[in-house]
């Protein structure tokens, strides 16, 4: 598996350069990435590096393109299983490089994805179905990516003190018609409103509790590039007609995908993601 992962080559991945093994000790050598992790640049910035909105939006695109490569463009399906801000490194050109494939699993494109022996990942980024079944999929990576979008746009960690859960908070603000209240205050007014709304709404869509309603990473890339329209959110939820893919409407945020519908009430809770290693 290490040899297979060593063949991964993409501008938005930290490439594996080599490895050595002696008895039970395995050392893996990756590219050196000078600016550290996205997590540290957001929450513990050093020097004069500030991630402007333009830089963050470019980072979102880079992570999405890296995940698209893993899910659809490599010779096998690679499920990362630990997408989070501390596993995104920022190179000298301020581009995102997805790293740490220690939990990654490879599958054939048309093969059955097997169950893991336990829930792996990081608290706050774990999809509800992964917590219930232990079965990782491309959709569970998409869920984690959605949480990451909200985290970086809001400047808040996925899980906070007390009962704070970022996805719940952004959902509630969206329902009240105050979506932009969640924006990282460090931006002031220096951000593109349309791009910010796109990212926040896409974050909610990717972190939706029903995996079949989440977009694929290919769809995510198209949304971020402006090639497709994202379902349009209104105050309490959404009224959506997006090329027949989803229909989300009304206060309870109904989602229809492939002819079936589900709903989330205004008091929706994502506490099931509080499981991990």
Image: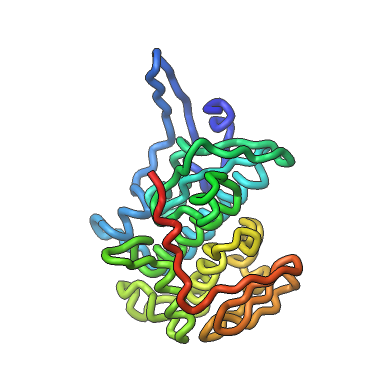
Question: Could you tell me if residue 62 is visible in this image?
Answer: no
Camera-side residue of 13 and 34:
13
- Residue furthest out toward the left: 47
x, y percent for residue 270? 45, 64
- Which quarter of the picture shows residue 240? bottom right
Q: Coloring scheme of the render?
A: rainbow
Give the vertical position of 21 relative to 205 (above or below). Answer: above
For the N terminus, the quadrant is top right
Give the vertical position of 251 relative to 183 (above or below). Answer: below
Camera-side residue of 119 and 2:
119
For the C terminus, the quadrant is top left
x, y percent for residue 226? 63, 70
Q: Residue at x 42, y 62 (%)?
A: 271
Q: Residue at x 47, y 58 (%)?
A: 59
x, y percent for residue 193? 47, 80
Give the vertical position of 37 relative to 226 (above or below). Answer: above
- Residue furthest out toward the top: 23
| Number of marks | 0
Q: Residue at x 46, y 53 (%)?
A: 126
- Which quarter of the picture shows residue 260? bottom right
Residue 185 falls left or right of residue 138: left
x, y percent for residue 238? 59, 81
Q: Residue at x 52, y 63 (%)?
A: 207
Residue 190 falls left or right of residue 198: left
- Which quarter of the picture shows residue 213? bottom right
Question: Could you tell me if residue 25 is visible in this image?
Answer: yes
């Amino acid at each position: 598996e290490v040899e297979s992962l060593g063949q991964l080559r993409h501008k938005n991945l930290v490439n594996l350069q080599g490895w050595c093994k002696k008895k039970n000790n395995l050392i893996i050598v990756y590219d050196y990435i000078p600016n550290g992790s996205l997590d540290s640049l957001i929450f513990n910035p050093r020097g004069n590096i500030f991630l402007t909105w333009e830089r963050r939006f470019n980072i979102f695109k880079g992570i999405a393109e890296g995940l698209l490569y893993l899910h659809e463009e490599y010779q096998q399906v690679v499920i990362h299983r630990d997408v989070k801000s501390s596993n995104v490194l920022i190179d000298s050109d301020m581009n995102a490089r997805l790293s740490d494939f220690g939990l990654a699993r490879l599958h054939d494109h048309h093969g059955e994805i097997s169950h893991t022996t336990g829930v792996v990942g990081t608290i706050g980024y774990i999809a509800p179905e992964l917590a219930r079944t232990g079965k990782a999929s491309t959709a569970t990576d998409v869920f984690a990516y959605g949480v990451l979008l909200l985290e970086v746009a809001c400047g808040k960690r996925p899980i906070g003190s007390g009962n704070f859960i970022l996805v719940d908070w952004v959902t509630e603000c969206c329902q009240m018609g105050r979506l932009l209240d969640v924006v990282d205050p460090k931006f002031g007014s220096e951000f593109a409103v349309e791009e910010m709304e796109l990212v926040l709404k896409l974050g909610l869509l990717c972190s939706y509790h029903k995996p079949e309603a989440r977009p694929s990473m290919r769809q995510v890339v198209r949304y971020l590039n402006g090639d497709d329209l994202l379902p349009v959110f209104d105050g309490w939820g959404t009224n959506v007609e997006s090329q027949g893919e989803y229909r989300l409407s009304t206060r309870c945020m109904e989602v229809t995908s492939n002819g079936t519908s589900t709903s989330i009430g205004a008091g929706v809770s994502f506490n099931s993601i509080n499981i991990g290693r």
